[in-house]
Structure formats: C-alpha cells, structure tokens
Amino acid sequence: MALPKAKSDATEARLSGLSIPEGGAAWAREARHDALNRLVGMGLPYRRDEYWRFTNPAEFLTPETPRAEIALDAPGFEETEVLHVVFTDGVFDAEASDDLAQENLEIERFSEAVTKDIHWIKGLLGVLEAAGQNRVDRPLAIFNTAFAEDGIVLRATGKVSKPVHLDYRRSDDRAEAVLRHMVRVEDGAELTLLESGVGAARLNTGMEVDIADRGAFHHVRMQGRDHERRAATHVFARLGEESTFKSFTLSLNGMMTRNEVIITLKGDDAVAHVAGAALGDGRDFHHDDTVFVTHDAVNCESRQVFKKVLRNGATGVFQGKILVEPGAQKTDGYQISQSLLLDEDANFLAKPELEIYADDVQCSHGSTSGAIDDTALFYLKSRGIPEDKAQDLLVLAFVAEALAEIEDEDLAETLRGQLAGWLERRR
C-alpha cells in the first residue's frame, strides 16, 4: 500500500541529505540498511497515525534542527557514587568521563562495538526494535537504528556495584544527537543505569535491553532544566525467566518529549515495572508517555504507574497497553495514569488499553484527572502552612506512588529533591 502523500513527503524531506554512518562491520551495515528500508516503507509519523493523534510529530521531522537555547546543566546524581559516562553534543567525551573499567561489567562505545566482526551485539542490534514494531509502528525508533553513530554498550556478567551514569551535555544551540545504547544482563547479574542532562536541541535515543534468566536491570532517568528540549526516547526490553526490569523517568520542563517503552516478558515469573512523573508549566510543554507491555510467559507481573502535574496550558499524554498472549496464564498486569491539573488551561489525554487472550489473569487499568483537593489544601493552611507550600506538599504526595517504583531509596530521595526544587522555583 502506498504511503499517504503527506507522510511520504515528510519522510523524503527528513531523510534528504542523511546517510547511514560509514564503516562498521558487515553485520552492522546490514542492520542499518535493513532499518532504512523499513523506515522508507513505513514512513515517518504524522498526525493521522493512531499513536500520534495526541502528539504532533512535526518537531522531530524538520530537516533543520530547531534552535534551542542552552540551559544550565541539569543536576544529575552528584551525591551517588557512579561510573560517569559523558556525551557532549551526542559524542562520547572521554576527558569528562571516568575510567570505564569496572568489575562484572564490560563497557565500550557503540561506535567501536559496531566495527568488530565478532561481538555480542551482533545478534541484538535492531532485533528488539524490529520486534517492537509488531502491532504499533515506531518509525522514530527505526530512524535511530539506521542513523545512530554513538552510544554505550554494556554487558553485566555479575552484580555491578556502582550505577553507570550517562550524563548528556551540549555546547551547541543546534546540536542534534542520535544515540544508541545496548545492554545485556547475563544470568543472575544486576545493573543500574542512570541518565540525566540536557543532551541536545533535538535528541533521539534508543536502548535495547536483553535480560537473561534471573537478571535484574534498574533504570532511573531525569529529564530536566532544558526548557526548549525536543526528545524522542525508546527503550526496548526482553525479559527471561525470573528476571526483573524496573524503569523510572522524572521529566521537568522541555518543549516536546515522547518517551516510548516496549517490554516483552518471555520467561516465566518475570517482573517489569515502568513508571514516570512529569511536571509541566506553560503552553510549550508537551509530554507523551507511550508504553506497550506484552506478557508472553506464565506467572509474570507488570506495573505501569504514571503521574503528570500540569498548569498554564501544559499538555500531558499517556498511551499504555497491556497485551496478554495466549498461554500467558497467571498474568498480573496493573496500569494507572493520573494527572493533577493545577488550572483550567492544562490538558491530559489518555488512552489505556487491555488486550487479553488468556483466561487465568488479573489485569486492571485506570486513568483519572483532577484538581488539588480543596479539603486537603484547607487542612494544611489551617495548620499554618502557606498556600503555595501546602500546594507543593500535595503535589509531592500525588507523585509518591510513581516514585515508590524506584527500588533504591537513595535514588528516590534524589528525585524527590529535584521535584521539590522545581516546585519552589515555579512558585
């Protein structure tokens, strides 16, 4: 079937002048060319696509990178002992990064890994992304597979003692970054990955996470301070037997953010939790969480918990789906998306979905929007707490369920501090 003209024209315009990165091993070139062919056949997103009807993809499609004023560096995880990995304007910054050697961890640049004839990512690059196109087109993720030039490759062979912190920085007000991260957690291994920073004027990141039996992967991300940021992020995860995947994202500010998480539970007794909190102020703020969790094994658990606090015309979007395949008995799937609208101009758009083909399951979803509880606000004010401070306390209480999904309490406390600081600055 031919692409609609608007989609075809937008795709042609965006791809004009772009070329697949040169060099690399034959398998990497093949994966990139396959992605480019899939992208041309699918076309880049436009507003009539089902999963883009709440979010205008135009910000990601202009051939010229939009200018974005360089904001102050966003606070990261300074109080956490980490392995620091820095990218400046989308390129690995060796001088600003730590020595990459760490026990139970193999780590190298993506740009180096794809040059090797024999490498463990040979059987993974683009594989989870391509599988994630089933039922829902994700063209910006295909774009990432085709054009990403740098990123990080991580293989955990045991329990990694320190989190790996990906710190995104920029020095160019028109910097565009396309980064690809590859993660493999071996049988019984455990890894924590942190992300923060301003990144680029326009940022496209892709991450493929393959978790073997009894492996555990923890992911905590902060998106903030860059008011004019445009970001499209994609996380694809495949879980083995008795494995664990937990991801949390805190988003503060930004002009256009689309975070996609696609998870497939392939091994029995696996657990996948994905959560997020977004705080937006102003009509330029548009934040979209799109999540798809597939249960394809017995006795697995998944949770989706998303909270958005919006005011002054800010817009929040949540699209979440739980798919239970035939035979995935004893599935426990939970999904909740809620917004706190601090004025009448804010907007929250939600599309929760369940699709179930097994009969012994426990699945639920819900989505609500509301304002500050006047009774609770009155109670706090009657105890001598100023109204703006009382409202901040209620906002923090509202997002607490999402923050509770972070397993490391020290990391959770760091993010609570970032939330509290944002609220104080916005009074």
Image: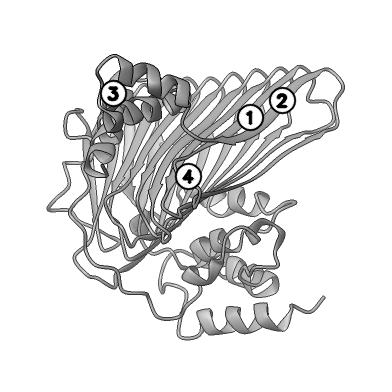
* Residue 228 locus on image (x, y percent): 33, 62
Element type at mark 1: strand
Quadrant assignment, res 383: top left
Query: What residue did someone put label 2 on?
Result: 364
Image height of 425 relative to 269, above or below: below
Query: What residue did someone put label 1 on?
Result: 335
Q: Nearer the viewer, mark 2 or mark 4?
A: 2
Q: Give the mark nearer the N terminus: 1 vs 3.
A: 1
How far apart, in angstroms, are the residues tagged by discs 3 and 2?
A: 29 Å
Circle 3: is it few (<14), some (14-19), or many (20+) Cα within 10 Å? few
How far apart, in angstroms, are the residues tagged by discs 1 and 4?
A: 34 Å
Q: Amino acid at mark 1?
A: Gln
* Residue 399 locus on image (x, y percent): 43, 29
Q: Are marks 2 and 1 in contact (CB under 8 Å)?
A: yes
Query: What residue did someone put label 4 on?
Result: 120
Q: Amino acid at mark 3?
A: Glu
Give the residue displayed 53% in from the left and 66% down from the top. Answer: 143
Element type at mark 4: helix
Q: Give the mark nearer the N terminus: 1 vs 4.
A: 4
How far apart, in angstroms, are the residues tagged by discs 2 and 4?
A: 38 Å
Q: Quadrant of the C terminus?
A: top left
* Residue 140 locus on image (x, y percent): 55, 62
Query: What residue did someone put label 3 on?
Result: 413
